[in-house]
Image (cartoon, helix red, strand yellow):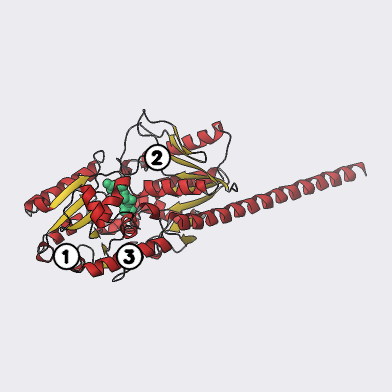
């Protein structure tokens, strides 16, 4: 295998070595970890940097000979929510530089994830010659348009998002819609390439619905609706709960599985409490199961057992859950927002409904539950679409190509600088020679 180069993936708040599906793991952890693993398999040497949140955590976790997670100390060794992390970022920059110094290396290429890591990347770029790629994972500039309580950090976050777009060497948009959002809310400047997120196509869709239900002890004749994700108001779970309470869905013998949740994140817990209270107040607790957070390896069986996966987000930059469900061969009913408009092809691989519109969601869910032929046709088309467009293999080929182009560009700049400094030296020598000649004359 050819050695491709060395890269640092920076994910300050999402530890890529946390077992996927365990506490604190979301789309970003999964993205960074899979990008790291697959790139390492393609010959890159990948170091993934994150913040150490517990004194018991190892500083370095080796995932494979070419891929490891490096935990840096920045602030206290305890979990700190994203909205409180900014003040510890300069420590993260210092720890990164110290690590480079101690191990006598300079990373020529960094790929930063989320605005917090973007800020770190911009500071590092000021300090040493490197190329920086940035992925947002979520845009504050869009998110805050849909939020009532705008946090204090909002203004700073949007400014940093703008700086990343204008000053990173390349921004990766995961869908054309994310690119539109960046241009309309942040800046017209900056170079962007569209490279989607991917999924491990080979791990999903391996069991039949019947077999999956046997394994999970779910009745074969029940209609199973699944939601997978964090408890965050922007995920729109309230819309889904209200939708299943409407007559269009209640006419079916249905059960809703809500998969996900974190105990260490207070915001997550607060939203979970709110949704559980809503389920009780609507008197539908018998039709809803909260599974809690599930190990990622258990998810394929849940998806396969389901008739439909619902993603009612108010805003979704990409939405890994959509492609996981499609890879599992089930249709997706999703809000017509962000990346979901890119991944879900309406009437082909699923249905789109306006965000927050529980009536529209209940009609879409009813259509899928009432028509098993349509469900199966959409499921098969979804599987094909993920295979063609969103496999990690294809996605990391595109990233690899981008990194190589940027490294070549850095190399050329370096060669140019060297020849300029050589020219300067020659020029200086000639000047000194002229002076000497003039003096002796
Ligand atoms: N996930 C998981 N176990 C859970 C809940 C979620 O492994 O109990 C995974 C899910 O399969 C998906 C990711 O968490 O890969 C969520 O990513 P997505 O892009 O949909 O949302 P984000 O968390 O980035 O907002």
Q: Secondary structure at mark 2?
A: loop
User: Residue at 25% across / 69% down in the picture?
Assistant: 374
- Give the CA separation, mark 1 to mark 2: 38 Å
Q: State the SS at label 1.
A: helix
Q: Earlier in the sequence, mark 2 or mark 3?
A: 2
Q: CA distance from mark 2 to mark 3?
A: 32 Å
Q: Is residue 284 visible?
A: yes
Residue at the top extreme, as displayed: 56
Give whichever of 399, 49 is nearer the camera.
399
Q: Is 176 placed left or right of 109 in the picture? A: left
Q: Which residue occupies 42% across, 56% down?
A: 162
**SS class of the residue under badge 3?**
helix
The residue that mark 3 highlights is 380
Residue 13 position within the rendered picture, expressed as x and y whole percent measured from the top left = 37, 42
User: What mark, if any, has residue 202 been given in the picture?
Assistant: none
Check residue 362 in the rendering and tell me which mark sits there, or answer none.
1
Residues 90 and 408: in front is 408
Going 24% across and 50% down the picture, which residue do you hit? 232
Q: Position of residue 161 (x, y in %)?
A: 40, 53
Residue, disc 2: 17
Q: Residue at x 33, y 64 (%)?
A: 382
Give the crowd class for mark 1: few <14, some 14-19, many >=20 residues within 10 Å.
Answer: many
Which sits earlier in the primary sequence, circle 1 or circle 2?
2
C-alpha distance separating marks 1 and 3: 23 Å
Q: Quadrant of residue 238?
A: bottom left
Quadrant where the C terminus is found in the figure: top right
Left or right, 360 with reference to 128: left
Q: Outermost residue toward the bottom?
A: 347
Query: Up-down: is 263 above or below 238?
Result: above
Q: Is mark 3 within 8 Å of ligand 1?
A: no
Mark 2, mark 3: which one is toward the viewer?
A: 3
């Amino acid at each position: 295998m050819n050695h491709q180069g060395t890269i640092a993936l920076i994910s300050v708040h999402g530890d890529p070595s946390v077992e996927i599906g365990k506490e604190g793991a979301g789309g970003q952890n999964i993205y960074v970890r899979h990008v790291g693993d697959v790139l390492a398999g393609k010959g890159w040497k990948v170091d993934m940097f994150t913040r150490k949140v517990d004194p018991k955590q190892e500083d370095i976790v080796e995932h494979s000979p070419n891929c490891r997670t490096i935990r840096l100390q920045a602030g206290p060794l305890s979990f700190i929510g994203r909205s409180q992390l900014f003040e510890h970022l300069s420590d993260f920059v210092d720890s990164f530089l110290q690590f480079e110094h101690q191990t006598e290396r300079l990373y020529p290429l960094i790929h930063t994830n989320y605005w917090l890591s973007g800020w770190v990347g911009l500071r590092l770029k000021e300090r040493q010659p490197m190329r920086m790629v940035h992925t947002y994972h979520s845009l504050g500039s869009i998110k805050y348009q849909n939020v009532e309580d705008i946090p204090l950090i909002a203004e700073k976050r949007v400014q940093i998002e703008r700086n990343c777009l204008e000053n990173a060497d390349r921004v990766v948009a995961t869908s054309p819609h994310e690119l539109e959002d960046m241009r309309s809310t942040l800046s017209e400047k900056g170079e962007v390439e569209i490279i989607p997120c991917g999924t491990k196509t080979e791990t999903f869709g391996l069991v039949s619905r019947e077999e999956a239900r046997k394994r999970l002890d779910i009745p074969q004749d029940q209609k199973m609706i699944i939601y997978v994700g964090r408890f965050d108001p922007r995920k729109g779970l309230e819309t889904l709960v209200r939708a299943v309470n409407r007559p269009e869905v209640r006419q079916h013998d249905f059960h809703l599985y809500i998969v996900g949740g974190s105990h260490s994140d207070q915001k997550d817990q607060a939203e979970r409490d709110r949704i559980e209270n809503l389920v009780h107040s609507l008197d539908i607790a018998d039709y809803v199961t909260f599974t809690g957070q599930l190990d990622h390896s258990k998810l394929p069986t849940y998806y396969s057992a389901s008739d439909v996966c619902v993603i009612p987000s108010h805003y979704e930059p990409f939405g890994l859950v959509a492609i996981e469900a499609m890879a599992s061969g089930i249709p997706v009913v999703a809000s017509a927002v962000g990346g979901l408009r890119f991944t879900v092809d309406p009437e082909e691989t699923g249905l789109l409904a306006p965000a927050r519109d529980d009536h529209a969601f209940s009609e879409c869910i009813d259509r899928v539950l009432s028509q098993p032929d349509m469900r199966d046709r959409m499921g098969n088309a979804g599987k094909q679409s993920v295979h063609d467009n969103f496999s990690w293999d294809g996605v990391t080929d595109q990233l690899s190509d981008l990194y190589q182009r940027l490294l070549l560009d850095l190399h050329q700049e370096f060669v140019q600088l060297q020849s300029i400094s050589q020219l300067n030296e020659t020029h200086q020598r000639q000047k000194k020679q002229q002076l000497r000649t003039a003096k002796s004359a």
